[in-house]
């Protein structure tokens, strides 16, 4: 704060004021400390979300600018708060089964008593 020697101003051989015209004082209670923001550690990865059509997977994790939170004109964090990652090794590709070609017919097994016969052939669902 400041003051001047004007109340009243010295005149007609009057003495000038004595003492300081300027004074410093603290006001810490009215100020804050600038704190720049810092990132938290990354969260754990989420469960893998698989796309079975392609056999691929995606997971993600997050972090926030609260370690510490910026305050009193401090800088915010710079960088990503969300991260995607792959987890293909945890996913399988859906494959619909398909039949192989028919095998050759077996020999005919005849029932001579009735005059009938049976033969067969096979195929498998591995194609």
Image: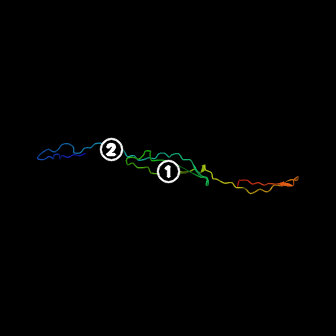
Quarter that holds the C terminus: bottom right
Residue at mark 1: 82
Q: Which of the numbered marks, if any, corresponds to residue 66?
A: none
Quarter that holds the N terminus: top left
* Residue that sits furthest to the right in the current view: 113
Query: Which one is in front, 91 or 116?
Result: 116
Q: Residue at x 32, y 44 (%)?
A: 30
Taking the image as shown, residue 126 lies to the left or right of residue 113, namely left
Across the whole image, how many numbered discs are drawn on residues? Answer: 2
- Label 1 neighbour load within 10 Å: few <14, some 14-19, many 20+: few
Residues tagged 2 and 1 counted as in contact (Cβ below 8 A)? no
Q: CA distance from mark 2 to mark 1?
A: 37 Å
- Label 2 neighbour load within 10 Å: few <14, some 14-19, many 20+: few
Label 2 secondary element:
helix
Query: Which one is in front, 117 or 2?
Result: 117
Circle nearer the N terminus (2, 1): 2
Whole-percent x and y of residue 51?
59, 53
Whole-percent x and y of residue 81?
48, 50
Label 1 secondary element:
strand
Whole-percent x and y of residue 4?
20, 46
Color style of the picture: rainbow
Q: Which of the numbered marks, if any, corresponds to residue 30?
A: 2
Whole-percent x and y of residue 99?
72, 55
Q: Residue at x 53, y 51 (%)?
A: 84
Taking the image as shown, residue 53 lies to the left or right of residue 77, namely right
* Residue that sits furthest to the left in the current view: 12
């Amino acid at each position: 704060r400041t003051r001047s020697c004007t109340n009243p101003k010295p005149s007609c051989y009057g003495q000038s004021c004595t003492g300081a015209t300027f004074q410093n004082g603290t006001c810490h209670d009215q100020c804050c400390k600038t704190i720049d923001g810092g990132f938290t550690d990354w969260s754990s990865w989420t469960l893998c979300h698989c796309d079975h059509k392609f056999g691929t997977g995606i997971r993600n994790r997050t972090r926030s600018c609260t370690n510490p939170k910026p305050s009193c004109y401090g800088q915010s964090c710079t960088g990503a708060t969300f991260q995607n990652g792959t987890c293909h090794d945890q996913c399988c590709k859906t494959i619909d089964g398909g039949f192989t070609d028919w095998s050759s017919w077996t020999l005919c097994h005849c029932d001579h008593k009735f005059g009938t016969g049976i033969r067969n052939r096979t195929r498998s669902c591995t194609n």
